[in-house]
Image (cartoon, rainbow, N blue to C red):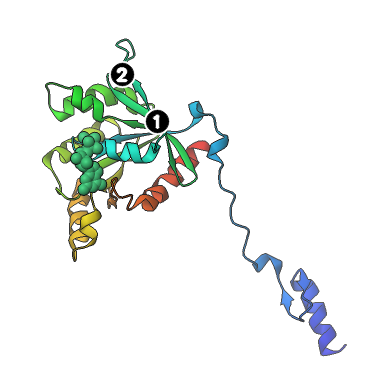
Amino acid sequence: MSNYNLFLLWCTRHTRSFSNRGFCTNSSSKNPPPPKLLDFTKIEISRLPTVIILGRPNVGKSALFNRLIRRREALVYNTPDDHVTRDIREGVAKLGHLRFRVLDSAGLEAEATSGSILHRTASFTANVLSNSHSLLFLTDGRAGLHPLDQEVGKWLRRNAPQIKPILVMNKSESLFDADDSLASAANEMSRLGFGDPIAISAETGLGMHDLFLSLKPVLEDYML
Ligand code: GDP
């Protein structure tokens, strides 16, 4: 048998095909097709996962909520009988192909007249957290680590151990300009013990892709 025929025989035994350019090609070694994206647009709103934005006042929770829901309408729960209530805004967020229900806790803080941040956070999160699938723990990268961030962190660890918060460092746009300031702010924030923060700017949209990458596995896992 000629070398060429031996080569063809080897190809048919060891690979699936023989290309017309004379190279053995193994279709199994070709790049696999990209995995199909879960189509969140086909999922009823009531079945979408819920993501809650938490953090001390003024870190930019409402700003992030507004960016995530864009111009879509937000629902405000304020019926006295509803125990998830007071003033919590809920909207449908869009981030890349992800869709989820997002809850903004900022209104409750504005309504609170007394009590520590822990008390205010506790009074509503206990009800809402059990129905949330992910949690964005928002901090302010410009202001740096604040004692109230530590308190929120401790509270979450104690009261919501079932949720692994995604630590987010908002107002980071100016940190990208100065040498090392982003790294040192992130380093400081990681002392909260929830891993490295995702640097974003709710105002400019910076870091939204990183936020998408962090939420994607959690939300897709929930839906599958
Ligand atoms: P919340 O109390 O956590 O809901 O905070 P807000 O969303 O009300 O924001 C508090 C302040 O921070 C407001 O003056 C916002 O304009 C400002 N802010 C929010 N996000 C950003 C940001 O990404 N960059 C900067 N520089 N300011 C921001």
Disc 2 target residue: 85
Position of residue 22 relative to residue 83, above or below, is below
- Residue type at mark 2 is Thr
Q: Residues within 10 Å of mark 2 (few under 14, many from 20)?
A: some
Depth order, front residue of 159/174: 174
Q: In terms of image quadrants, where is residue 219?
A: top left
- Ligand 1 sits in quadrant: top left
> Is 209 situated left or right of 46 in this image?
left
Q: Residues within 10 Å of mark 1 (few under 14, many from 20)?
A: many
Residue 164 image position (x, y, % from top left): 33, 40
Quarter the N terminus occupies: bottom right
Residue 153 appears in the rendering: no
Residue 162 image position (x, y, % from top left): 35, 34
Which mark sits nearer the N-terminus, 2 or 1? 2
Residue 183 appears in the rendering: yes
> Is 7 situated left or right of 58 in this image?
right
Residue found at x 36% / y 50%: 208
Q: In terms of image quadrants, where is residue 38?
A: top right
Residue found at x 58% / y 35%: 42
Residue found at x 22% / y 60%: 183
- Residue type at mark 1 is Gly
Residue 48 image position (x, y, % from top left): 48, 32
- Residue extending furthest toward the top: 81
Disc 1 target residue: 91
